[in-house]
Amino acid sequence: MPADIAILTKYFPKLTEKQREQFEQLQELYSFWNNQINVISRQDIENLYEKHILHSLGIAKVLNFKHGTEILDVGTGGGFPGIPLAILFPECQFHLVDSIGKKIKVVTEVAQALGLKNLTAQHERAENVASDFDFIVSRAVTRLKPFYGWVQNKVTKNQFNDMKNGILYLKGGDLQEELDEFGKKYKLYNLSDYFSEEFFETKKVVYVPF
């Protein structure tokens, strides 16, 4: 087993053979597309599995999405956290949006190469997405208060997961000022409780129930 994929199987030992194969493909796919359209820093492409894929899967440590859950990934960039989550949860539906068209091109090409049937991608701003979803996920695209404003009308009232529908937002560093500004109910999950690598020491998932 390649060393890179080992960091995933360490924390997600029940991956199917198909899931392992899909995760293994990501290094080659992102290396190729990153040379065409820069979506990940040159330094980070060497640490893709830790800093992008495992980081994205931190959301799965907070909530194990039930079959049929519909998830919107806002400001997905090159496909994070949406693509790793779509591999992990093949029975859920993911819709990835970004306001930069060339990033959505990368998402579309990667998803197609992986054969992901449970993922759609759209070049659009979050505010203009017409559908609603069970959960909104994202990775540090902006401060929580304006982000909430973008997506507050996108969450369905139909509840069937183990947590109330809402936002699962990957953030890092000292968030106190930002959370004080936000002024609504939230819960913090430290990714250092789930992952031992130094990178995760200050990384969190902010859960905002609706």
Image (spheres, rainbow, N blue to C red):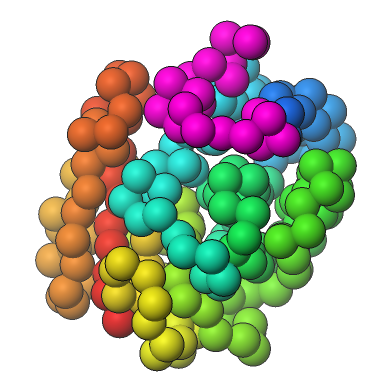
Image vertical order of residue 103 relative to residue 95, above or below:
above
Picture quadrant of residue 92: bottom right
Name the one closer to the observer, 180 or 184. 184
Q: Which residues are magenta?
A: 1-20
* Residue toward you, 8 or 154: 8
In the rendered image, is residue 112 in sight?
yes
Q: Position of residue 45 (x, y in %)?
A: 64, 24
Q: Residue at x 58, y 16 (%)?
A: 4
Image point 79% across, 24% down: which residue? 28
Q: Nearer the viewer, residue 12 or 110?
A: 12
- The question of residue 101 being in magenta is answered with no
**Horizontal and vertical percent position of residue 129:** 63, 82
In the rendered image, is residue 148 in sight?
no
The quarter of the rendered structure image containing the C terminus is bottom left
Q: Viewed as shown, does residue 25 lie left or right of 199?
A: right
Q: Is residue 19 covered in magenta?
A: yes
Q: How many marks?
A: 0
In x, y percent, where is residue 93? 63, 66
Which is the main secondary structure of the residues drawn in magenta?
helix
Identify whether 63 is placed above or below 40: below
Q: Position of residue 50 (x, y in %)?
A: 48, 25
Q: Quadrant of residue 97?
A: bottom right
Side of 156 where 118 appears, left or right: right
Residue at image coords 70%, 73%: 124
